[in-house]
Amino acid sequence: MGSRKACEMHTKRFLDKGLNVVIDRCNFDQQQRKTWIDIAYKYNVPIDCIVLTTAEQECAERIQSRVDHPTGVEGESGVNILKRFMKNYCPPTINNPEGLERILYLDPSPEPYCTPERIDSIFTLLNQCPLLK
């Protein structure tokens, strides 16, 4: 989509239609997540969070091996972006849920590609997480 503002616009448009929305963005701190939480509250929809627990080293290796990635985060410059991200990274916690209803901490999959079955299993795990509020 190119920008957070564009993502916000599309999110609101789909919520206006009564559809569910998945936000796939890093949102490395509470302030960045607040944008989406505020929108969810405005629309009176639940908001869950999936925290990817992939180790920094594995992320760096994946970035190094990327070619023609749509975000442009690849190679050595991509690893430098990752390092800056990790300095600022502050994931949500069960002790400070920030208004999130559920938080799932998801370990990396050994499979190189995501399948519809994997997505279904992740949503099943998310639905099994306890409500935080």
Image (spheres, grey):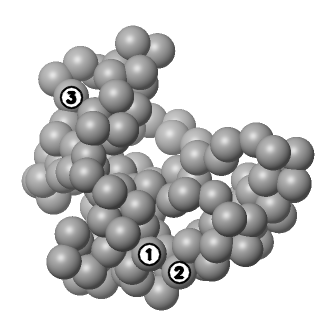
* Sequence-earlier tag: 2 or 3: 2
Q: Amino acid at mark 1?
A: Gly
- Visible residue check, residue 91: no
At a point 41% along the width and 61% down the height, the residue shown is: 101
Query: How far, Cα to Cα, is label 2 from label 1?
Result: 9 Å
> Can you tell which mark lies on residue 129?
none
Query: Where is residue 25 drawn, in percent x and y?
Result: 51, 59
**In terms of secondary structure, where does tag 3 sit?**
loop
Q: Is residue 92 above or below residue 88?
A: above
Q: Quadrant of residue 126?
A: top left
Residue located beneath label 2 in the image: 34
Foreground mark, 2 or 3, reads 2
Residue at (16% x, 23% y) in the render: 110
Left or right: residue 83 compared with residue 74: left
Residue 133, position in %: x, y? 36, 69
Dots 2, 1 in contact, CB < 8 A: no
Spot occupied by residue 36 in the image (x, y as percentages of width and height):
60, 70
Asked whether the viewer can see residue 53, the reply is yes
Q: Which mark is residue 109?
A: 3
Q: Secondary structure at mark 1?
A: loop
Label 1 – label 3 distance at C-alpha: 27 Å
Q: Quickly name the residue at label 1.
A: 99
Q: CA distance from mark 2 to mark 3?
A: 28 Å
